[in-house]
Image (cartoon, rainbow, N blue to C red):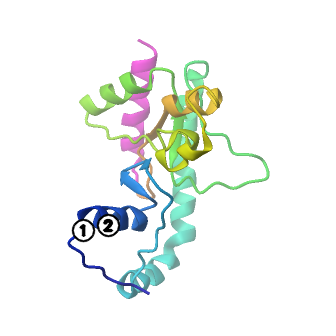
Amino acid sequence: MSGAMTTDDEQLANTCRMLRDHGQSKKYYHDIEGYNGRLDAIQAGILRVKLRKLAEWNEQRRKCASVYDQQLVSLEGGIVLPVQPTWAKSVYHLYVIRVPCRDELRAYLADEGIGTGIHYPIPLHLQTAYQELGLQKGDFPVSENIASEILSLPMYPHLRLDQQQQVGGKVQKFLLR
């Protein structure tokens, strides 16, 4: 299912844009509750082909996560690595570490040509979409602290070992300085 909308009302157009993208006015800033329904027939056809590779790609991501784990485990105390419960088998869509000096590490990695991400930098209770709940900064200090420390390292099925070694090496160099 798909659709289209036309309007000369800029406010209505902006609201519709936010509704189609999880209520975001910009990435990770949710002003209203929204949706994500962007799968059209062409994307469905491509997905059908790609699904045949899903198990292989998930296993490759697990191997990549294992390499990061081995590289970064010695830094424990200055870094928090992802935890996989014994009852789970993560697919590592993201490989998210926690470091108190997240912004400085991110800038350093960017200077070294390594892209990173900050997935979900604002806790839900501080999103504009939920301001009617009356929650404020300080109401969920653990979530707020974690949101200020999370950093997603490069992660995708075809990430090469030498690329991971470069990322891990740069993270080590920064944190051991």
Depth order, front residue of 84/170: 84
Residue located 56% across and 52% down the image:
92
Q: Quadrant of residue 102?
A: top left
Q: Quadrant of residue 41?
A: bottom left
Type of amino acid at the residue the image marks with label 2: Leu
Dot 1 corresponds to which residue? 9
Depth order, front residue of 133/56: 133
In this rendering, position of residue 115 left or right of residue 61: left
Type of amino acid at the residue the image marks with label 1: Asp
- Residue furthest out toward the top: 177
| Magenta stretch secondary structure, dominant | helix
Q: Position of residue 174 (x, y in %)?
A: 39, 20
In this rendering, position of residue 116 left or right of residue 68: left
Element carrying mark 2: helix
Residue located 44% across and 87% down the image:
1
Dot 2 corresponds to which residue? 12
Element carrying mark 1: loop
Q: Is residue 175 a member of the stretch shown in magenta?
A: yes
Q: In what quadrant of the picture does the C terminus appear?
A: top left
- Labelled pair 1, 2 in contact (Cβ < 8 Å): yes
**Marks 1 and 2, how far apart at CA:** 5 Å
Up/down of 152 relative to 103, above or below: below
In this rendering, position of residue 61 left or right of residue 171: right
Q: Which residues are magenta?
A: 159-177
Q: Position of residue 117 (x, y in %)?
A: 40, 42
